[in-house]
Image (cartoon, rainbow, N blue to C red):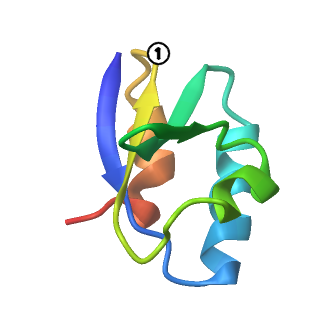
């Protein structure tokens, strides 16, 4: 399972992030601590504390997944 951190700064980024995730054929988990949600659901993503980077876990070994998520990755 691959882990990266994403930072979503505004509603437009959340919408674009969910759109990208929804088109990828893989299982994802997004969150921090005990709160883990399905990032393919925009309402679930909004339940998180988006002022902090969130850990994204992906079960895909496809390298293009990270390329698609590059605009959202936290430095």
In the image, what residue occupies the spot 65% across and 43% down?
Answer: 39
Badge 1 crowding class, 10 Å Cα cut-off, few under 14, some 14 to 19, many 20 or more, is few
Quadrant location, the C terminus: bottom left
What residue occupies the far left of the structure in this picture? 75
Left or right placement of residue 17 versus residue 61 in this view: right
Residue 74 in picture, x, y percent from top left? 28, 63
In the image, what residue occupies the spot 66% across and 56% down?
Answer: 45
Q: Is residue 41 above or below residue 11?
A: above
Counting labels gives 1
Q: Which residue is mark 1?
A: 59
Left or right placement of residue 31 versus residue 10 in this view: left
Quadrant location, the N terminus: top left
Dot 1 falls on a residue whose secondary structure is: loop
Residue 42 in picture, x, y percent from top left? 77, 57
What residue occupies the far front of the structure in this picture? 34
Left or right placement of residue 62 versus residue 33 in this view: right
Q: Within the image, what quadrant is residue 14 found in? A: bottom right
Residue 59 in picture, x, y percent from top left? 47, 15
Residue 46 in picture, x, y percent from top left? 68, 64
In the image, what residue occupies the spot 73% across and 41% down?
Answer: 40
Seen from the viewer's position, the closer of residues 4 and 68 is 4
Q: Is residue 34 above or below residue 58?
A: below
Q: Is residue 2 above or below residue 6?
A: above
């Amino acid at each position: 399972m691959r882990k990266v951190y994403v930072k979503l700064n505004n509603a437009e980024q959340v919408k674009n992030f969910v759109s990208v995730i929804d088109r990828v054929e893989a299982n994802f988990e997004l969150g921090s601590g005990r709160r883990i949600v399905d990032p393919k659901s925009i309402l679930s993503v909004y339940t998180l504390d988006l002022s902090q980077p969130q850990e994204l876990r992906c079960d895909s070994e496809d390298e293009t997944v990270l390329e698609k998520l590059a605009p959202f990755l936290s430095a």
